Amino acid sequence: MTPTPEQALQIYRTMLRIRAFEEKASELFLAGRLPGFLHTYIGQEAVAAGVCVHLTREDTITSTHRGHGHAVAKGARLDMMMAELFAKQTGYCKGKGGSMHIADLDLGILGANGIVGAGIPIAAGAALTAQMQGRSAVTVAFFGDGGSNTGAFHEGLNLAAVWNLPVLFVCENNQYAESTPREVHQKVKDIATRAMAYDVPGVVVDGMDAMAVFAAASQAIQRARAGGGPTLLEAKTYRFMGHYVGDTGAAYRDQVEVERWKQRDPIPLFRRALLEERRVPAAELTGIEAEVQREIAEAVTFAEQSPEPDLEEALRDIFA
């Protein structure tokens, strides 16, 4: 299955929005203008864009500490995301969540999560809710290769398989669990093979190829909506930056390896496919790129001009 012309342009725009948002956020963070921590998704854009283009507002996602890309792909507003990073009152969590906790239940974004693998059982729970309510909604759980080593991964997959839940588990295998190469912390070559233990489909896809991600996700999501149960989709991808902004990665990554992966940057690859295979006019793509840059500038202005939270806000939304 290939994307329609509208879907293809949506995927391209989404990847651009993710990349531009994170490049600007990194610049602001390094200038000392954003508090907290920042873990970028740069290099992995094809995964979020290729999966989330299939989702509706009723569908839900869970995310990771590297969650900006997932939120943008699910439809989050860039200005509210930027305001959250600035810790302003107009942010998605009123400035109290920061980069790793952006959520919008109305958009089906159940939240980024600072705990490795923690979104997996939450996704299973959301899928169980949809199933029990008789809705056709699907949940997607994004997590990394390190997350696939946690107990939450095995518990979530087992329950989803046993209860035939409408959930897609998307492992973004970016080759490193923080600074540990995948082959050091995992015996298996393909994480997707772990699906065999739970008698669900395990699929490996090129995570740098948005078309390939689109096709694999389409099949799995359609299967889940039709009552076919869960799928484990492993996207082989790469984060171009270090584990967090400020980490160069030089201590544990060979620069030759980094440059080799950058040769397969998903955005230029997809742009070339749009031009050469889809015959999309270059001017149309240039127009989208300019629109995204304007949107980023407006998001920064919105965040900068937004008010700081009141002191009383620190005691609101607390549950015990």
Image (spheres, rainbow, N blue to C red):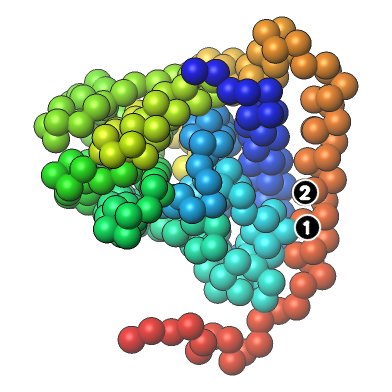
* Residue count near mark 1 (Cα–Cα under 10 Å), binned few <14, some 14–19, many ≥20: many
At 63% across and 17% down in the image, what residue appears? Answer: 269
> Does residue 117 appear in the picture of this structure?
yes
Which image quarter is the C terminus in? bottom left
| SS category of the residue bearing label 1 | helix
Nearer to the camera, 257 or 297 = 297
Give the CA distance from mark 2 to mark 1.
6 Å
Amino acid marked by disc 1: Val
Q: Which mark is residue 197?
A: none
* Residue furthest bottom in the image: 312
Image quadrant where residue 90 sits: bottom right
Q: What is the x, y in percent for residue 233?
A: 34, 30
Residue 296 marker: 2
Which mark is on residue 300? 1
- As helix, strand or loop, the secondary structure at mark 2 comes to helix
| Residue 125 visible from this viewpoint | no
Q: Position of residue 243 (x, y in %)?
A: 47, 43
